[in-house]
Amino acid sequence: MEKPIDSIGGYLKLWHRYAGLWQTIYTVLGVTATTASLVVASFAQDLGTSWIRTIAFVSALAIGLIGALDLRNRGKNYRAAWRHLNPIWLKFQSNNCTEEELIKAYGEAEGFIGNFDVTLPAIKGNGRPEGA
């Protein structure tokens, strides 16, 4: 029967994968937002109104997702958790640390990841985000 401590290796693999995934999403959305903004700014006279609106919407959506999902930090947090736990896991695998040390490091690493919070802008009475 597998002990719960044996699943820590699976969490490490998952956290490594999540770190790469979130960082890739962040990069793709950032490049998309930047490119879309540059296209609107550079080719506004050549594009029709519907194209300008569509491309501007894509840019705003990408920036909104980056901010609302805190993508800048999400991948970094998974990477930090992985970096914290991985050396302890390797020590544990080679019998150079105790289960208690591994469990403590796992709890600390979970703390790096934090909760999955979504931050939406506060809306004022006029229906616009604060500061707009």
Image: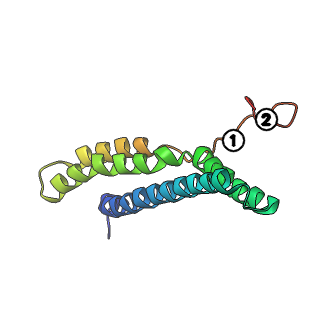
Residue lying furthest right: 126
**42 horizontally vs 100: left or right:** right
Q: Label 2 sits on what residue type?
A: Ile
Q: Nearer the viewer, residue 101 or 2?
A: 101
Residue lying furthest bottom: 1
Residue on which the image places disc 2: 123
Q: Nearer the viewer, residue 102 or 46?
A: 46
**Residue pictured at 16% horizontal, 48% vertical:** 97
Which disc, if any, is residue 15? Answer: none
Q: Which x, y percent locates residue 61?
A: 67, 53
In this rendering, is residue 120 above or below 19?
above
Q: Label 1 sits on what residue type?
A: Leu
| Quadrant of the rendered image containing residue 125 | top right
Q: Which x, y percent locates residue 99?
A: 23, 50
**Residue pictured at 48% horizontal, 43% vertical:** 114
Q: CA distance from mark 1 to mark 2?
A: 9 Å
Residue on which the image places disc 1: 120
Could you tell me which secondary element the residue under label 2 belongs to? Answer: loop
Other residues around mark 2 within 10 Å, as few (<14) / some (14–19) / many (≥20): few
Tell me the quadrant of the picture where the C terminus can be found.
top right
Could you tell me which secondary element the residue under label 1 belongs to? Answer: loop
**95 horizontally vs 53: left or right:** left
Tell me the quadrant of the picture where the N terminus can be found.
bottom left
| Number of numbered discs | 2
| Quadrant of the rendered image containing residue 48 | bottom right
